[in-house]
Image: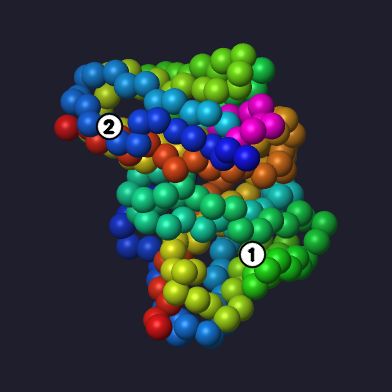
Amino acid sequence: DAGVTQSPTHLIKTRGQQVTLRCSPKSGHDTVSWYQQALGQGPQFIFQYYEEEERQRGNFPDRFSGHQFPNYSSELNVNALLLGDSALYLCASSFGLAGGDTQYFGPGTRLTVL
Amino acid sequence: GESVGLHLPTLSVQEGDNSIINCAYSNSASDYFIWYKQESGKGPQFIIDIRSNMDKRQGQRVTVLLNKTVKHLSLQIAATQPGDSAVYFCAETPTYGGSQGNLIFGKGTKLSVKP
């Protein structure tokens, strides 16, 4: 049973560039959430996708956008990168929208903005 | 969310001892709580969860205790092993106010197990 997978594992970009990160959910899951984890901190919720729509959003600017595909995989896009966007980006999958379903995390994508 | 900088609270224990990691959560409306373990360079790994209608739940070598009166959560690890060394996060899921499903993570605790 494949767990949550993310690509790429590492990425280096410069300020002002745009980046796309990818996530495939755990088999049987249909909901994908994205989190940003700065060094030494807990993950911060960015947004959640279900049925190809953004259902919830955390306190992140519009530079952060996403997409979910019919096969439940998801992308996170960040435009006009800032130095402060350097972080580990985590994807988590779960089943359904109701609160309380366990979210399983992928290994993350380490983004470095120079 | 809160900023804790680079200095996580650290718990150092001897191999074979029991470990207790504590967490204060923020939202009295939260009804689902999870403990995650995060090893260096990896994503958070699910350990154990508990719902607000319970005050204790046991897994393999781990026990979670929930005290809703003081909004406190703890994780107990029995017979701690070197492989338990990691950062441990508690997370809560509020289910009111349109915020179903997103996890709010607490401050992590770094567990260091001495052989």
**Label 1 CA crowd tier, 10 Å (few <14, some 14–19, many 20+):** many
**Label 2 CA crowd tier, 10 Å (few <14, some 14–19, many 20+):** some
Residue A105, image x and y in percent?
53, 42
Q: Is residue A37 shown left or right of residue B50?
A: left
Residue A108, image x and y in percent?
42, 40
Let me know if marks 2 and 1 both belong to one chain.
Answer: no
Quadrant position of residue A20: top left
- Count of residue discs: 2
The answer to whether one can see residue B102 in this image is no
Q: Is residue A32 magenta?
A: yes
Q: Nearer the viewer, residue A25 or A54?
A: A25
Quadrant position of residue B58: bottom right
Which range of residues does the magenta coloring cover?
A26-33
Q: Nearer the viewer, residue B82 or B29?
A: B82
Residue A59, image x and y in percent?
47, 31
Residue A34, image x and y in percent?
50, 32
Q: Secondary structure at mark 1?
A: strand
Q: Amino acid at mark 1?
A: Leu
Label at residue A11: 2
The answer to whether one can see residue B81 in this image is yes
Quadrant position of residue B57: bottom right
